[in-house]
Image (tube, grey):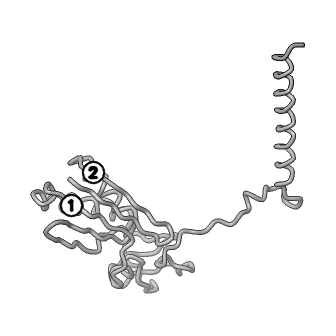
């Protein structure tokens, strides 16, 4: 008799039924013991950084190579305590093993012509980052005819260098992060 009205009524009835199904799903996901949904308790894979300490270091601990101090749960630039334990920091371990956590690859004709300026900009970014985060360091710089590759001990420094290059000189900036390997590859070209 009124086809439009019956369609509306049917769709409203369908909505109510789907709401009930949604409530049923929510109830099924609730844990009977803690009230926390199962989805919240699902295990998440942690970021795999092979150089991150698996145990808490005794405090104070100092790196015998760079003299950075582990204090209050993190590595910091401080005066070396007399009674400190000695353990190499993750940045020195990475540098010794030649195993970077990130790299910046700089290519293009502009980079060949302005290589010294670009490297100074990268070193300034390292200096700025390292003041607050002692494990953010440039491990090495490989200069080739067509590219400059800057290898770092952390994944945050390559991003900072890439963004600084982008702000200063424009160009094309690309990031590739692999969580499984804890590695950031930044490419800048101009």
The answer to whether residue 123 is left or right of residue 31 is: left
Residue 142, image x, y percentages: 21, 73
Residue 101 vs 27, above or below: the answer is below
Residue picked out by circle 1? 107
Residue found at the very far top of the displayed protein: 1
Residue picked out by circle 2? 172
Q: Which of these two is toward me, 41 or 27?
A: 27
The answer to whether residue 49 is left or right of residue 66 is: right
> The N terminus lies in which quarter of the figure?
top right
The answer to whether residue 76 is left or right of residue 44 is: left
Q: Quadrant of residue 148?
A: bottom left
* Mark 1 → mark 2, Cα distance in angstroms: 10 Å
**First reached walking from the N terminus: tag 1 or tag 2:** 1
Residue 38, image x, y percentages: 78, 59
Residue 137, image x, y percentages: 32, 69
Q: Quadrant of residue 132?
A: bottom left
Residue found at the very far left of the displayed protein: 113
Q: Which of these two is toward me, 76 or 26?
A: 26
Q: Residue at x 29, y 74 (%)?
A: 139
Q: Which mark is residue 54?
A: none
Q: Secondary structure at mark 2?
A: strand
Q: Quadrant of residue 5?
A: top right
Residue 138 vs 31, above or below: the answer is below
Instruction: Tell me how many marks there are.
Output: 2
Q: Residue at x 42, y 77 (%)?
A: 90
Q: Residue at x 51, y 70 (%)?
A: 180
Residue 133 vs 61, above or below: the answer is above
Instruction: Classify 10 Å Cα crowding around label 1: few (below 14), some (14-19), many (20 and above).
Output: many
């Amino acid at each position: 008799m009124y086809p439009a009205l019956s369609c509306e009524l049917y769709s409203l009835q369908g909505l109510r039924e789907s709401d009930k199904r949604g409530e049923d799903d929510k109830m099924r996901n609730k844990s009977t013991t803690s009230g926390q949904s199962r989805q919240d308790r699902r295990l998440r894979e942690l970021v795999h950084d092979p150089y991150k300490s698996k145990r808490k270091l005794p405090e104070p601990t100092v790196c015998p190579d760079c003299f950075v101090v582990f204090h209050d749960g993190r590595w910091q630039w401080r005066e070396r305590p007399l009674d400190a334990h000695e353990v190499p920091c993750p940045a020195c371990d990475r540098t010794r093993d030649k195993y970077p956590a990130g790299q910046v690859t700089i290519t293009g004709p502009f980079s060949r012509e302005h290589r010294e300026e670009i490297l100074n900009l990268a070193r300034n970014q390292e200096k700025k980052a390292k003041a607050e985060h002692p494990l953010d360091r440039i491990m090495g710089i490989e200069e080739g005819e067509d590219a400059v590759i800057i290898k770092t001990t952390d994944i945050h420094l390559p991003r900072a260098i890439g963004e600084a290059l982008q702000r200063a000189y424009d160009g094309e900036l690309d990031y590739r992060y692999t969580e499984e390997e804890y590695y950031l590859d930044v490419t800048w070209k101009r």
